[in-house]
Image: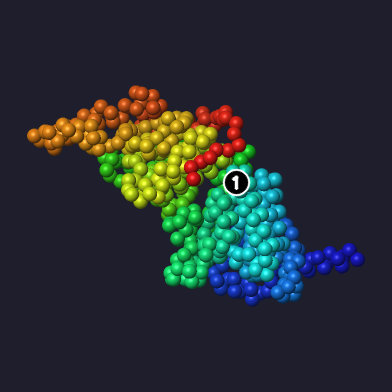
Amino acid sequence: MMQERVAELRSIKDDVLRGPDPEATTRQHARGKLTARERIGLLLDEGSFEEMEPLRRHRARGFGMEAKRPYTDGVITGWGTVHGRTVFVYAHDFRIFGGALGEAHAEKIHKVMDMAVSAGAPLVSLNDGAGARIQEGVSALAGYGGIFRRNTRASGVIPQISVMLGPCAGGAAYSPALTDFVFMVRETSQMFITGPDVIRAVTGEEISQNGLGGADVHSSVSGVSHFAYDDERGCLEDVRWLLSLLPSNNRELPPREPADDPAERSAAALRDIVPVDGNRAYDMREVLGQITDHGDFFEVSPGWATNVICALARLDGRVVGIVANQPMSMAGVLDIDASEKAARFVQFCDSFSIPLVTLVDVPGFLPGVDQEHDGIIRRGAKLLYAYCNATVPRVSVVLRKAYGGAYIVMDSQSIGADLTYAWPTNEIAVMGAEAAANVIFRREIGAADDPVAVRTQRIKDYRSELMHPYYTAERGLVDDVIDPAETRSVLIRALAMLHRKQVDLPQRKHGNPPQ
């Protein structure tokens, strides 16, 4: 009798693994998409997946639902390992109800989210669903509410990663937006609140799904997505890379790897990469390549707000978060988007005990009517708030320009950086020498017989008196002026010293950051 029951169970589970029908799988592949189980197989270590509730079925009635009750109810949930560490996952199965969310479907997701928090392990969602299941009415909407609440409660507790591998419309798009990182695949994944048909009916605007909410739009225009890929395999490979850099939860430190790139390695090329002339651009990524272990770093949102770089990397095997101005884009100024991008990255690193390294070459905040009217004050303050609130080890290096409020905001010593260093090319000041001379010596220049000569001399005077490389060091506002070639070794020694940093904060429920 037991053998018969076991044989029946195996038959049912074989059906579950095969999926709804071969034609549905063929259609999924024809769209250029993998099945949910194929995706899980690429994400997790081989053979490590343990499925939860594979035999779950919906209980909905009416609208023909009684006749169609497939196992899994359109979502596969469970856990496995990535590089040997536990990771929880749920994956919409587009072959079943188009991946639409119903009551049972939502309950499965709620359960895996709760387990991820309890176990203290990252959660990855593989999204490919058509939104709420209309046939189940308000029960489906309530299911989304439960997901949003859990996303919020898990924020800063476990890493949450959303991988968009198909459509995500309406309220469903808010769950990815609440997570730490969003990955998208070009052509096959889209995110929007109201689709092209609704927009056409309401506003008369014509736009395609990809033009409205495709991967390139969200990774370069809106900033909703942090990464965009041409195919699912490359996307999931980078999800694995990201997970290798993150702690499992907020009670653990990021995983350290054995370091085979010497900590004292000289980075002499830095003396040539960064021009002394502050008006000449260079690629800050080349600086990161000289400093980090083996020149590897994982850049976040590389296509959005390109005037600031945010990246995860290793220094002597330890994971660090790097924030750096990018002179190749808008001269490295801070604007609304760059401030918000860097602020969220700083907050993420602080949530998960990832030390922060800030590389400064900033001429100021971007001037302009649009910037002021769009809220550069309150939105720029987000970056200031994030740094001031961060308790992880913080080390900053001024490479070249550091002017005005932007200097303060880029983790200066005055807002709590533990250690600040500067290169001999640094210019730390309220503003550039040219602008300063025009303000201070305006009357003298205007009254001079040769205003050009007077202005030139006053610029030199201001630069020599208040902007020479050691002015800030003499006043204790940087800890040392260092040889660029020693930047890597200086950072590694500083972070090793700060490894067990402790901070006592005033008791409070939470702060109230700028909106």
Tag 1: Cα neighbours inside 10 Å, few (<14), some, or many (≥20)?
A: some
Does residue 82 appear in this view?
A: no
Residue under the point 74% across and 66% down: 58
Expressed as whole percent of the image width and height from the top left, the position of residue 18 reads 70, 69
What is the three-letter code of the residue carrying label 1? Ser
Looking at the image, which residue sits at the far left? 449
Q: In this view, does 250 lie to the left or right of 259?
A: right
Residue under the point 37% across and 37% down: 405
Expressed as whole percent of the image width and height from the top left, the position of residue 311 reads 47, 46
Expressed as whole percent of the image width and height from the top left, the position of residue 404 reads 34, 36
Expressed as whole percent of the image width and height from the top left, the position of residue 468 reads 28, 29
Toward the viewer: 358 or 423? 358
Residue under the point 64% across and 76% down: 23
Q: Is residue 57 above or below residue 358?
A: below
Q: Is residue 415 left or right of residue 120?
A: left
Report the number of discs. Answer: 1
Q: In which quarter of the image is residue 272?
A: top left
Q: Name the residue under label 1.
A: 155
Residue under the point 36% across and 26% down: 473
Q: In this view, does 154 lie to the left or right of 446?
A: right
